[in-house]
Image (spheres, rainbow, N blue to C red):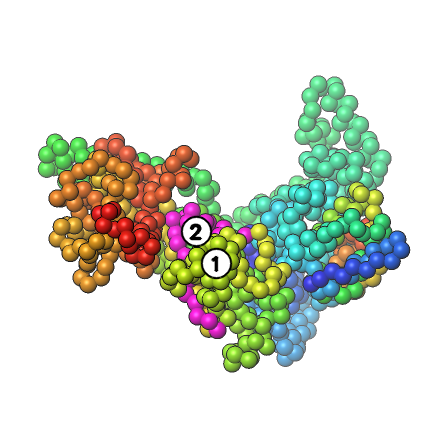
Amino acid sequence: MKIERKKSKDTSTLIFEGELTIYNVSQLKDELFADYDKLADKIALDLHAVTEIDTAGVQLLLFAKKFFSAIHKSVFITKSNESVESVLVALDVNSQFAR
Amino acid sequence: MNLDGALQTFFAEAEDLLNSMEAALLRLDEGDKDMETINEIFRAAHTIKGSAGLFGLNDIVSFTHIVENVLDRARDEKITVSGDLLSILLPCRDHIAVLVENAMHERANDETCLAQGQALLDALKPWLGVAAAPVIAKQESNASAGFFDGNTGGSSDRDSWHISVRFGPDLLRNGMDPFSILRFLRTLGEITHITTITEHLPEFNDFDPEQLYLGFEITLGSNASQQQIEDAFMFVREESSIKIIPPRSNIYAFVNLIQSLPENAQRLGEILVKSHAITYQELEAALATQKNQAKALGKVGMLGDILIEEQAVAPEIVNAALDKQKKNNEKKSSPENRFIRVDAERLDKLINLIGELVINRQRVDLLASKMGNPTLIEAVTSMGNFTEAIRDAALTLRMVPIGDTFQKFKRVVRDTAKSLNKEIELEIEGAETELDRSMVEKLNDPLMHIVRNAMDHGIESISVRQARNKPDSGTIKLTARHDAGNIVIGIHDDGGGLDVEKIRKKAITNGLIEEGVHLSRQELFQLIFHPGLSTAEQVTNLSGRGVGMDVVKRNIEELQGGIEIESEMGVGTSLSIRLPLTLAIIDGFHVTAGNIDFIVPQNTILECVDLNSLNHVQGQNCVNLRGDQVPYIRLREIFSLQPGNHSREKIVVVQFGEKRAGIVVDELHGEIQTVVKPMGPIFQALKGIGGSSLLGTGAVALILDIQQLISFAINREHLRNNAFSVNIQEQE
């Protein structure tokens, strides 16, 4: 699992790849928030390459949303896949990541 | 709560249930007409379905559900169970057994198996009745389809339950995912609305991503009973807060819910309104009524009063309660309740009291022998035997098999191996070995770290393994066995092994050892427990979880245990953790040195000899014991006690793991039951002392920490032999 960062004008895109589960959320947290002040004001999450997501993974995304909102950065999902989408919909948190 | 352990329990239970189901079916076949027999079969099917749903074993759920429906009709006397039906129900039972068996071995159910199941279900159709059929079709599609392709619209003809859950913080870490519960709820009906509560996500620095902060407000459309819904939370009930409101409950039930939850009332109210549980007007009115009444009565928290006054308790709640009671009564008649759950605190209290009893018995012993009355001595001796028996029996109450802990690693290994792109199998040996419950809890973290280390740094990637002519799949083996009053836990992997040279170089770079100092293999291995020594070339996502090997070692030492390492490059690594069985009461050996009483744990003692009868190794604190050199220490010397009579010194030869040493004392007194009291905080840094105990005379005896003393003796001889050999003459 890794997170790739891309920056264009006013948007930073974070591309997640691999599993997003209890087994790597600790590592992902460090990666996600490393040098977060360098991120643009709009943060786009690209989740299309996430192979598996569990409650811990969803919780990390919700935490990111809450954290960045507090420092006036918006967080939304640009790309996703069926399995991620189904989990987010099942917990009814998908709307929180709308653009 | 550990789900994998729970899964094992489910398999064991399912086997029992299937057996009693078979027996009951056969009784029916022999002409038994008792309603209780049908009830028994129904209960068995019902319980299997419920538990299977919790673990996402959907094939079992969908099949058993239909069998259960047929049995339910038999229970309601809509159909009679006779020859024809029996000849289908028996194979149905066998089919459930096959499904359970497959699940146990993590085998997928193949097509033949599923076709057999379908054939049986088709055969059951005539007994199903018309009304049940559509429900079944629905259930089936839910069970087999993905998580969220079900109908999300409200269902007006069904009852809606409201469920409010705040999970325990350690749920995720314990290998449990709240999704499995949602998945099970979906087998009971339809989740028409769900709100994920994120209010408890903490500030950045306090956020631990492995801890669970979320909660759910769920609206469930279902015909299930309260018991069935409660069962969904069976495995998380203890640590979580779960509130279930039955359908068509009075508005005050929701007001009560809002008040009992920690979140903001306004927000909760909105959630409930949004999920159609209540209307906005109702909520406003109820809150207002309560406020007024509170004012009038001059007190708060009288919601119970309102409920009664307004006759708010809906008939459904009463029904649900009755239903539950009925179920409980049914349970009593089954043979399940062979275990009693006891509060751990009560158990600890009992052990403490028995500790006091043991001390007092020693006092009585002493007094009796002083008085010299033979009848009294005899009575006291036999009382003593019983005291010991009581002590042993009480200690076994705290003993639990280590298997549950080991089982937890199955999922960890499977999932971690996947994320590392390695193939790793976990073998377990000696799961039935028992040890003290309090120690099991403290073992979890160190074991987890060692196993993760073995998977991450030990087992090689598939390509490396192929190059080394090893099987693609690596093996990690967890073992446990008893060994002379200790429990030995082994963690073995067939990975790359430890690189002694790399450890040495790293240790020299980090200034842990000096260049040119000779260390044995074992001593070099032990360096990995030093903080800040990691030999992994690459830090992967598993390392750096905050627990280092130094913490592992410290945890084990806190349990009076030790770790030994054996490793061979390219072949694998074995760690053995050696722990005492219990920390509460031990068999001790009473000795004195310099007029101070000491206790040597009996299970560490090899023999006691007169020091003067042994040959001393010239110029060293070492004796020759049947050809072996055994280093020794004088208690009087290391604790700076008063000098005593040197001519009568005794040596107690002790062993811990593979290491031996002698402890020189002034006098031996003999075996004694020792109640271990931990040392006060001031003394905890004191080396060589593990605790204290009261003697029958009321004097305090210090319990020796044999492991530390042995290391001390060996290290001292080591230094003497190497760096300080010049000074020997002066010291002696």
Q: In front here: B302 or B223?
A: B302
Q: Amino acid at mark 2?
A: Ile
Q: Label 1, on which residue?
A: B508
Q: Label 2, on which residue?
A: B556
Does the magenta run of residues contain B561?
A: yes
- The x and y percentages for residue B54 are 62, 58
Q: Is residue B337 visible?
A: no
Q: Amino acid at mark 1?
A: Ile
Q: Is residue B249 visible?
A: yes
Q: Could you tell me which residue is drawn at 62 percent across and 67 percent down?
A: B420
Q: Quadrant of residue B545?
A: bottom right
Left-right relation of A46 to B30:
right
The residue mark sitting in front, 2 or 1, is: 1
Q: Which segment is the magenta one?
A: B547-570
- The x and y percentages for residue B611 are 16, 50
Q: Look at the numbered disc 2 and give the secondary structure of its residue.
A: helix
Q: Could you tell me which residue is drawn at 51 percent across and 60 percent down?
A: B506
Q: Could you tell me which residue is drawn at 38 percent across and 36 percent down?
A: B683
Q: Residues within 10 Å of mark 1 (few under 14, many from 20)?
A: some
Q: Disc 2 or 1, which lies upstream in sequence?
A: 1
- The x and y percentages for residue B629 are 23, 59
Q: Are marks 2 and 1 on the same chain?
A: yes
Q: Is residue B257 above or below residue B551?
A: above
Q: Is residue B513 above or below residue B270?
A: below
